[in-house]
Amino acid sequence: MIRKWIGSTCIVVMLLVVFSAPFIWMLISSLTDNKDLFLSNEMWSLLPERWAWENYVEVFQRIPLLRYLMNSFVIAVMHSVLETLLAAMAAYTMIIVGGRIGRLLFVLLYMAWLIPGTFLVLPRFLVTVFMPYAFPASEFWTEPRIWDVFGQQVNVGGIIGLDSFFALIVPGCFSATAAFLLAAAIRQLPQNLFEMALLDTGSQRLAFRDACLPSIKAPLAVVAFLAFHGSWQSFTWPLLMASSPDMLTAPIGLMTFRDLHQAQWSLVMAGGVILTLPSVLLLFFAHRYVIDRAEVHDNAVVAL
C-alpha cells in the first residue's frame, strides 16, 4: 500500500514538473535582464543574478499592451457568453423536440462537428469581408467609430466587416462540441422537470431560462471557461480580421512586438506571463466546476 502511494506520488510530481516547467522558465526569463538572458552556458544556472521587475513596466511602455488586453478581454467575454448561450439553446432544442426531428437535428449537428475548423476559416472570412456590401451605404458599416472614454479618443472599429468587434466575436461562436456536452447534461435531468416548468410558465423560453439553465450550472461553467480560454488565446482569426493597431488582440500585439524588437526576449516573456494569468485565475476560481468536466465528458460519450 505504501509502495503504491509512493509510486503514485512520484508520478504526480514528475507530471507536475514536466507540465509546469515551460511556465516556470518563461517566468524566470521575464524577470531576467535581456543582456544577461543568454550569457550563461551552464544548464542549471537558471536563476538570474538580479531580478528585473522593471520588465513588466517596460513592456507596457513599449507597446499599448493595456489596449490589446482590453480588446482580448472584451472579445473573450462576449464570445464565451454567445457560445455558451447558443450551445445551451441547441442542446435544449434537441432534447425537448425529440422524435425524428430531434434525431435529424442531432445528425446535422454531428455532421457539422465532423468538419475541421480550418476548412471554415476561408468561408467565414469571405462572408465577413463582403457582409458590409450587402447593405446600402457600406461606408456607414465600416467607418471606424471613435468613442470618448475618460477624456481619451478610443477607436472601437466599424460595426461590421474588418476591424470590427462583430467580426472578431460573432463568426465561429457556435461550438458543436459544447452543444454535445450540454445535451448530454440536459438528458440526465428528469423530463418531468421541463413539463412542470412548461405548465407553470406557459413558454419554452421561460422553461429554458428558469428550469434548464439553473440545473446545468457546472456544464455551463465548463463550456464558458473553454470558450473564454479558446478566444483569449486565439491567434489565426484575429490576425485575419484585425488590421488596425487599435483593434489588435494581445497575442497579435506580442507577435508584432517580437518582430519589431527581436532582441527583447525578456519583454516578450513578460508579456507572455501577463497573457497567461487571466486563464490561470479563471481556472482557479472555476476549478470546482471544471472538476465536473470528467463526469460531463463521460455522459457525452455515452450519448454519442
Image: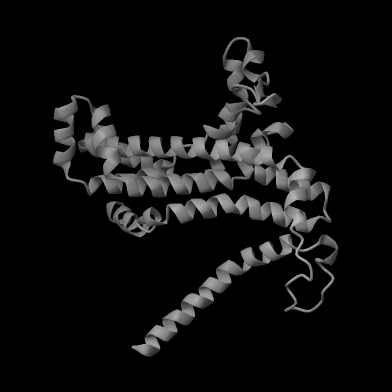
Most foreground residue, 154 or 120? 154
Residue 235 rendering spot, x and y as whole percentages: 63, 45
How many discs appear? Answer: 0
- Taking the image as drawn, is residue 177 in sight? no
Residue 285 rendering spot, x and y as whole percentages: 45, 53
Residue 261 rendering spot, x and y as whole percentages: 83, 50
Q: Residue at x 56, y 73 (%)?
A: 17
- Taking the image as drawn, is residue 292 in sight? yes
Residue 35 rendering spot, x and y as whole percentages: 86, 63
Q: Residue at x 57, y 13 (%)?
A: 135
Q: Looking at the image, is 104 positioned above or below residue 199?
A: below
Q: Residue at x 57, y 72 (%)?
A: 18
Q: Looking at the image, is 94 positioned above or below residue 294?
A: above
Is the N terminus in the top left, top right, bottom left or bottom right quadrant? bottom left
Q: Colour scheme of this structure image?
A: one colour
Q: Residue at x 33, y 41 (%)?
A: 107
Judged left or right of residue 33, residue 205 is left
